Image (cartoon, rainbow, N blue to C red):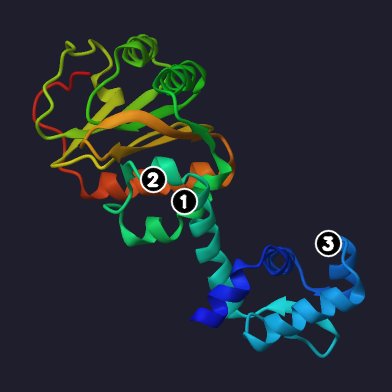
Amino acid sequence: MERVLFELSSTRRAAILELLGNSELKMQDVARELDMTGTEAFRHLQRLGEAKLVLRKASGSYDLTPLGKLGMSLRSGLAFISSHADYFANHDASRLPYEFISRIGELSKGVPSFNMISTMNYIDKMALETQDHIWTMSDEVQDSSAKITIERLRKGEVTLRLILPETYVSRYSPVTGAEERIERRYLPHIPVGIGVTEKDAFVVFESVKGNLDYTGFVGSDPRFLKWARDLYLCEWERARPTKAGPPSY
């Protein structure tokens, strides 16, 4: 384990692994792409081979081994949380299903939004710009985005899914004429706030104080969006179905 972690910790060798993750390359191609000498590229590739992270094929090209692919997937997550150490020292991601902890590096494709107002503005933008659906999981409904969403629901422009805590009490009246466009489910506890449309997402983790402070990550990159969408669908499946009667927002 120490040997693998040591090789992954090298910026130069990690760059080679990332390069080979995209396509097989010969030594001279690696040297050219990363502005190395041939000797330097050979030395790094040899070390990676000894650690069983890459292999040299009969054609002379190098490729990642399954161990190399796994190591890089774990490294991306460690690099992501390390680059935002202050945030993750004060926000808890440990309650996520293991699948999403292991994939947390995909959130590096998002944009940090460590100011609550900036995050709220982004959420309003999502509500305004979506052309199809809005899926949210939160410990409460935000007034500004709620007003935008309610108006769009009444116009028949979007559909809405809500995951809320079981203790939530709605401050909003039923959205007359739009009940069939709203789905609502409940969880005992909301460990992460998520909003997903067809093109944007936000992810905010629970603070050490036990609440969602709406600081986190936003973005539209496909990998960031997929992580948020997959987690939302996972939580939707385990959430309790909506209560009987007309849904309210």
In this view of the protein, can residue 108 be seen by the observer?
Answer: yes
Name which of mark 1 and mark 2 comes first in the sequence: 1
Q: Position of residue 47 (x, y in %)?
A: 71, 83
Q: CA distance from mark 1 to mark 2?
A: 7 Å
Q: Nearer the viewer, residue 96 or 175?
A: 96
Residue 21: name its quadrant: bottom right
Which residue sits furthest bottom? 58
Q: CA distance from mark 2 to mark 3?
A: 32 Å
Residue that label 1 marks: 81
Residue 185: name its quadrant: top left
Name the residue at 38% across, 61% down: 99
Q: Are marks 1 and 2 in contact (CB under 8 Å)?
A: yes
Q: Position of residue 34 (x, y in %)?
A: 83, 61
| Rendered view: 108 above or below 123 | below
Residue that label 3 marks: 34
Name the residue at 62% across, 85% down: 51
Name the residue at 39% across, 10% down: 155
Name which of mark 2 and mark 3 comes first in the sequence: 3
Name which of mark 3 and mark 1 comes first in the sequence: 3
* Kind of element beneath mark 3: loop
Amino acid tagged 1: Ile
Residue 232: name its quadrant: top left
Amino acid tagged 2: Phe
Q: How many marks?
A: 3
Residue that label 2 marks: 88
* Kind of element beneath mark 2: helix
Q: CA distance from mark 3 to mark 1?
A: 25 Å
